[in-house]
Amino acid sequence: MRLKTSFAGLSIVVALFACQQQADQAERERELAGVWRLVSWQLTNAAGEIKYPYGETPEGQIIYTAGGQMSAQLMYPGAELGDMSGLDSAAAISQVSRTFFAYYGTYTVDEVAGTVTHHVRGCLRPDWVGTDRVRHFAWLDRDRISLSATLEGDTTVPGENVLVWERVE
């Protein structure tokens, strides 16, 4: 009888812990929820050189919903695509993503690791669909956050990418 009571008690503790973890996850997602404007995107390559993939005044928006959905669009303002005639689809996507990039999906936050993971459902780059994109985050103040990622092996923007976002709403 005592063993049954211990297992029942343990089951309750485990269930309460799981509920608290879900509540904590929901709270972290609510903190991030909103519309964010891209302030800057800086890339530091392996040689330590700083570059601005979409210029020094990029435009963009990332949206996180309280329900765990996300979408991101980034744009190089004023950039021209150039002549795309005769390009196969891979080359055309590569050329377009030099001036515009977008993806969407769901997200989860890991406060302990300081990461937000974008679970990509759709993307301008088909090779991102179905992948997880981990971003390290740092709150710069109440309405500013930086998201950074090291994109090893990414031929589009390899190196340490740091994007600063400002809350719009």
Image (cartoon, helix red, strand yellow):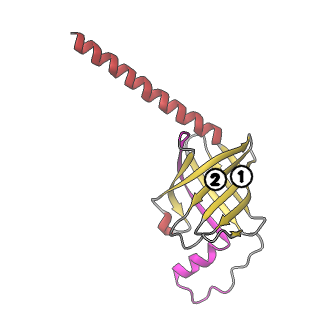
> Is residue 86 within the magenta segment?
yes
137 or 105: which is nearer to us? Answer: 137
Residue 50 horizontal/vertical position (percent): 70, 68
Residue at 66% of width from left, 53% of height from top? 62
Task: Please give the range of residues in magenta.
Answer: 83-112
Amino acid type at image mark 1: Trp
Tally of numbered tags: 2
Furthest residue toward top: 1
Rendered image: mark on residue 34: none
Q: Is residue 113 above or below residue 21?
A: below
Residue 84 horizontal/vertical position (percent): 63, 85
Furthest residue toward left: 1
Quarter holding the N terminus is top left
143 or 73: which is nearer to us? Answer: 143
Assign a secondary structure to mark 2: strand
92 left or right of 81 in image:
left
Furthest residue toward bottom: 86
The crowd level at tag 1 (other Cα within 10 Å; few <14, some 14-19, many 20+) is many
Residue 15 horizontal/vertical position (percent): 39, 25
- The mark that comes first in sequence, 1 or 2, is 2
Asked if disc 1 and disc 2 are in contact, CB closer than 8 Å, the reply is yes
> Is residue 100 within the magenta segment?
yes
Assign a secondary structure to mark 1: strand
70 left or right of 168 in image:
left
Q: Quadrant of residue 109?
A: top right
Rendered image: mark on residue 165: 1
Residue picked out by circle 2: 147
116 or 158: which is nearer to us? Answer: 158
Amino acid type at image mark 2: Leu
Residue at 62% of width from left, 55% of height from top? 148
The crowd level at tag 2 (other Cα within 10 Å; few <14, some 14-19, many 20+) is some
